Image (cartoon, rainbow, N blue to C red):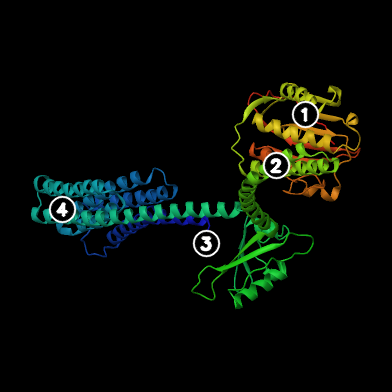
Amino acid sequence: MPSINSITSDQAQLQDMLTWRPLRLLNYYRLFLSSIFALFFVTDFTGKILGTQQPSFFFWTCLLYIAISLSFIYASYTRSPDFKKQVSLQAIVDIITITILMHTSGGIESGLGMLLIVNVTAASVLLSKQNAYFISALASLAVLIEQFYSSYFVLTEVINYPKAGILGALLFSSASIASTLSTRSRESQALASQTTAELADLEKLNEHIIKNMHTGIIVVLPSGQIHMANEAAEVLLGNQKLDNQPHLSAVSAPLYQRLTEWIKQPNLDQLPIKQERGLTELQPGMSRLDINRQDSEIIIFLEDAAQLNLRFQEVKLASLGRLTASIAHEIRNPLGAIKHAAQLLTETLEDPSDIKLGNIINTQVQRLNHTIENILQLSRQNTSHRDTINLHSWLSDFKTEFCSSQALPAEQLSIKINPADTDILFDSTQLHQVVWNLCSNAVLHSSGQKQHVRIQILGGVSLDSRHPYIDIIDNGSGIPADLVQQIFDPFFTTSPAGTGLGLYITKEMIESNRAKIHYISLPTGGSCFRIAFVASQKTHHVDITTSQDTDH
């Protein structure tokens, strides 16, 4: 595919071919004509035909015409003045000069007036139709004026107005034909230029799309020689440079082997390709540029197999969520009946062992009901309505409510937000549930007694991202390093009493508000969950020297 620069260069060359280049040829023709006239006059090659009436005037006019032709040639290369002015000026000079040469050689009978047809036609090709008619009219008028002047002032014996009229008609006809052909040529040029510009824009768009797409693109010959590749392909292949068009086998031997297998069996299923040096697995796809040609170039599409599996997993989880939500909804009614019946039965029992069994039924029913509530909440996540929330003020109210609900002394939950006027954009209802879940987990998974629980909520504006954040830190046993990557997965739990949905729902709520959450391992023990928020427009600009960012 030609580059945009080559397309622009071709367009400029086409424009030059239809304007300045013909003008230079006309100038060389003018110089040649004036030189031949002067040479023939000096050598008397034509036998006293040129300059018969006024030889001296004829000769000096030829010399002046030579000088003017040289100046016109120089002006055509410097392109000053502009093209239209040069053509118009040269046409007028040609009419005047040829008319003088015709007059000094005996008038229209000399035949030199026919030279006007060449110059007028050339000017008509290079000018617009209106200007072409003006030039032809000017030339016809010059011929008639010459005849009129010769008949009344020079008193020549041969005066031929009909020939002058015929010559004027020829000038108009040649100008009309040349102008029409030139107009059509310019229209074709304009259409070609428009098409070229559209192709250049389309090529630029294609280059932008291919360059910025996440899918790797490699175009190879059937022999395996790489023709072109985008940056995504270079990154997926280990940041190898492919612009020097290496052979595919030198870049990735497994991928080249897969290419040769695909050429033999195009319907072969493409399995992921494992790469060395710890690079990600590749999921290839192949297609010919021209399916009707066996020697056509081949496009290789490369995807990160892990990312594809992640997208497939998300689709499966979404389908599973809808299915489990439907099942959970159907279970609620019989579960409610079991709970009510167990409560009634427990009230009528007197044997302690029977009462204990009834309480077990009630406890497990409550646990099942809690699981169902989580599943239903997960399936009907509504669009968040983000509000501007002042972190310090909101967390102060939250602390009062949470400590009262959990029967925790106020000193066991500390809050520190610096600067205190940090604002965020978040759905207030969902923020309450998110922070409540994380703080409840801190109490639930505390390694000691409830009176030993310590929760810190530190926040402010990050020095790196300049986004507001909060860290919810507890003094528990922490999360093992081999389980950190799984804690936000649905139905993953290390507690026999847990559902494995709490952190997953928390993460989904946070991301629905365009925020992020991640776990930070603490060297001193305990857990730290950091939530990075979207800053409110009301948040004041914070000097990074006064902002506190606690690294854990």
- Type of the residue with mark 1: Gly
Residue at the disc numbered 3: 1
Tell me the residue at 65%/47% (across/down): 331
Residue 412 circle label: none
Pointer 2 local density, CA inside 10 Å: few below 14, some 14–19, many at least 20 = few
Q: Quadrant of the C terminus?
A: top right
Q: Residue 335, percent across and down?
A: 68, 45
Distance from disc 1 to disc 4, alpha carbons, whole Å, reads: 94 Å
Task: Establish if 160 lies above or below 465.
Answer: below
- Badge 2 or badge 4: first in the primary sequence: 4
Left or right of residue 190: residue 108: left
Residue at the disc numbered 1: 459
- Badge 1 or badge 4: first in the primary sequence: 4
- Type of the residue with mark 2: Ala
Residue at the disc numbered 4: 168
Disc 1 element = strand
The outermost residue toward the bottom is 264
